[in-house]
Image: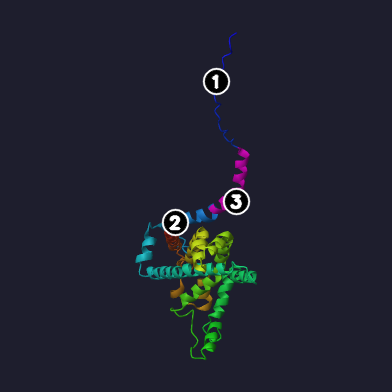
Amino acid sequence: MASPVSTPMRPVALTRARPRFRWKDTRDGALMAAPAVLGLIAFVAVPFVAAIVLSLYNVQVDQSRPAKFWGLTNYVRLFTDPVISGAFLRSLVNNLVFAIVVIPVQTGLALLLAVLLNRKLAGVRFFRTFFFMPVVFPMALVAVVWRLILDRSSDGLLNSSVTFLTGGLVPAHDWLGSSATALGSVILLSIWQGVGFQMVILLAALQEIPEERYEAARLDRANGWQQFVHITVPGIRNTLIFVTLLTTILAFRVYDQVFILIRTAGANEEGTQTLLYNATQAIYSESNLGRASAISVVLFLIIVVITLIQRRVLRQGSES
């Protein structure tokens, strides 16, 4: 009797099933994203493109004659025209000084407060709320309060405090009117108002660091500074980069406090005006929409370049 011949079994090739395209999921996702996308297009993309186009024309909003194409003339005049370039370059320098001081000081102070308030201490919730309160107040209200604090008369809170502490040896000073202290006053106001927002972001990042890392470091006899450098900073690295970039953008967009202090408190205009203030003056005081658009485009390019440089430097530093 012949024995049956067994044929070897061929392995069955397993093929991964392709996910089926679901039109319903795509439609629902598109509908949910549509309001945000439309908002970005309407309030970001369209105004930005319009600013670029208008910056190439001589647009006088108070005149009925049609706009004339100027090409890059508006940009050239910002740096070469003896009448226009003076105010523009002063605004640029003021903005750079403002950013150079505010970015490290405000970020460092926010990090210090976040570290101090990330401890289990009595009343820590009160202090977290206390330092965050200025962020909730509108900048217009904050500027009005600081106008009273920095009032040039002897009744101003700062002047009366200095006079009391020095026994009248130091006279009242015009903090906002003096070119030496006007920009410093705006910087102080801005740091006071914005540091709480950064503090909350950094505090949330600190609370995500596992406590076991600090316990292991203490077992290895690491001191507080070593724990901060080797555990805290690496643990919040990405958040710290985000906060620094956000502060940079906001530092170059400073306007509200400058406008209010100049218009209502008689602050030194040359010493405090910024690029955004200069742009609004070009359109509202001189009705020159083309030049205002050119200033806005220059401001955007400055922010983009500085942000990219910052991001690259911070990333390289964190990787090394």
What secondary structure is marked by label 3?
helix
The answer to if 25 sits in the magenta stretch is: yes
CA neighbours of label 2 inside 10 A, class few (<14), some (14 to 19), many (20+):
few
Q: Quadrant of residue 209?
A: bottom right
Q: Which residue is more in the foreground, 213 or 190? A: 213
Asked whether residue 209 is in view, the answer is no
Marks 3 and 2 close (CB-CB < 8 Å):
no
Which amino acid type corresponds to the residue marked 2 in the rendered image? Glu
Residue at the limit of the structure toward the top, as seen here: 1
Q: Which residues are magenta?
A: 22-40
Q: Nearer the viewer, mark 3 or mark 2?
A: 2
Residue 148 can be seen, yes or no: yes
- The tag earlier along the polypeptide, 1 or 2, is 1
Amino acid type of the residue tagged 3 in the rendering: Pro
296 or 135: which is nearer to us? 135
Spot occupied by residue 244 in the image (x, y as percentages of width and height)? 49, 63
Please identify the quadrant where the N terminus is shown: top right
**Which of the two marks, 1 or 3, is nearer to us in this view?**
1
Return the residue at label 3: 35
What sort of colour scheme is used for the picture? rainbow
**Residue that numbered label 1 is attached to:** 8
Which of the two discs, 3 and 2, labels the residue nearer the N terminus? 3
Secondary structure of residue under mark 2 = helix
CB atoms of marks 1 and 3 within 8 Å: no
Q: Where is mark 2, residue-wise? A: 319
Residue 65 location in percent, x, y? 44, 60
Residue 218 relative to residue 288: left or right: right
Of callouts 1 and 3, the N-terminal one: 1
Q: Is residue 100 left or right of residue 209?
A: left
Q: Position of residue 250 (x, y in %)?
A: 50, 64
Badge nearest the viewer, 1 or 2: 1
Q: Does the magenta portion include 154?
A: no
